[in-house]
Image (cartoon, grey):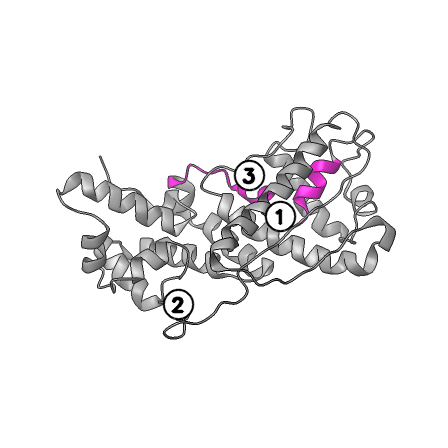
Amino acid sequence: MSAPSVFAFLDYRRFIEAWVEWRSTQRAGYGLGVFAMNARLGRATLPNILGGRRHPSPETLDGIAEAMHLDPQEHEFLSLLVDIQRASTLDEQARLLRAIFAHPRYAAGSQQDPDLVEALTSGCSGVIFELSRLPGFQADPAWIAARLRPEIGVDEVATALDALRRAGLVGADAPHRVHTPSQVDHIAARRAHLAALDAARQALVQVPWDEREFHFTTVSVPESAVPAILTEVKAAVERVRDLADKYRDEGEAVVQVQVQAWWAGKQVRGGVSGSENT
């Protein structure tokens, strides 16, 4: 059994986990602790990275690549995977995705379809996907752009529509729901949320008040209650999906619903939390 190839991954955390799991089959007693020691990582560094609480710094990444015996191209590609998770704008993520897709060893080693990844991570693809399932839909960028709110340029719509077509997500055989493969769900979700937040900002200005609902609240609760609040937010979105499914064959309009909740502040006990980079 050969070692997992970094070029088959889009999530660097999953690559690290898969590599350590593979190494444990080759060497008795090998695990995350031994890997962390070989990579010269502090006791809490690897759990924080794999748990999504930190991204590795360049120095930390050097240690990880050395522990895995990655060649220069593999090291470079791993750095791209870290950078795309760290990216905070859609433009930056798009640039990094293009660099990943253009890498010759990604094309040779990946099991992911770049067309599908591009379609799932395009800013307006979700709205176009839903609009395409309505009666009278025309797969024309200008026609689509004229019906989107907030406004989206024809060129951006054309790019998203082309990606959806190549991925088989527009047309007679398109699925009712889009399910992201496990290797792209994180990137797709991150880009979709960034695009949705930007769309909400524009919708607050462009969409008439009687055709939208915006609500905002900040509350203080015991730490033990935070998981319950986050679960309730997720359940609210599921209830909207269930309601929409009742009208599956009666669609006339596309409604974008987004709900956010996060741990915005906490009482500090015994010090100040660290930076995002380790």
Q: Cβ–Cβ below 8 Å for labels 2 and 3? A: no
Does residue 127 sit above or below 48 in this rendering? Answer: above
Which mark identifies residue 277? 2
Q: Residue at x 42, y 67 (%)?
A: 276
**Dot 3 lies on which element?**
helix
> Which residues are drawn in magenta?
109-131
Q: Which residue position is annotated with label 1?
A: 122
Whichever of callouts 3 and 1 sits on the residue coming sooner in the sequence is: 3
Q: Which residue position is annotated with label 3?
A: 116
Magenta span contains residue 122: yes
Give the CA distance from mark 2 to mark 3: 30 Å
Residue type highlighted by circle 1: Ser
Question: Where is residue 76 drawn, in percent x and y?
Answer: 36, 58
Does residue 181 sit above or below 200 in this rendering? Answer: above
- Given the current orientation, which residue lies at the most extreme left position? 28
Dominant secondary structure, magenta: helix
Q: Residue at x 70, y 51 (%)?
A: 156
Within 10 Å of disc 3 (Cα), the crowding (few <14, some 14-19, many 20+) is many
Whichever of callouts 2 and 3 sits on the residue coming sooner in the sequence is: 3
Residue 22 appears in the figure: yes
Question: Where is residue 167 drawn, in percent x and y?
Answer: 59, 35
Between label 2 and label 1, give the one nearer the viewer. 2
Q: Quadrant of residue 203?
A: bottom right
Magenta span contains residue 230: no
In this rendering, position of residue 79 left or right of residue 257: left
In this rendering, position of residue 76 left or right of residue 254: left
Residue type highlighted by circle 3: Leu
Does residue 136 sit above or below 217 in this rendering? Answer: above
Within 10 Å of disc 2 (Cα), the crowding (few <14, some 14-19, many 20+) is some
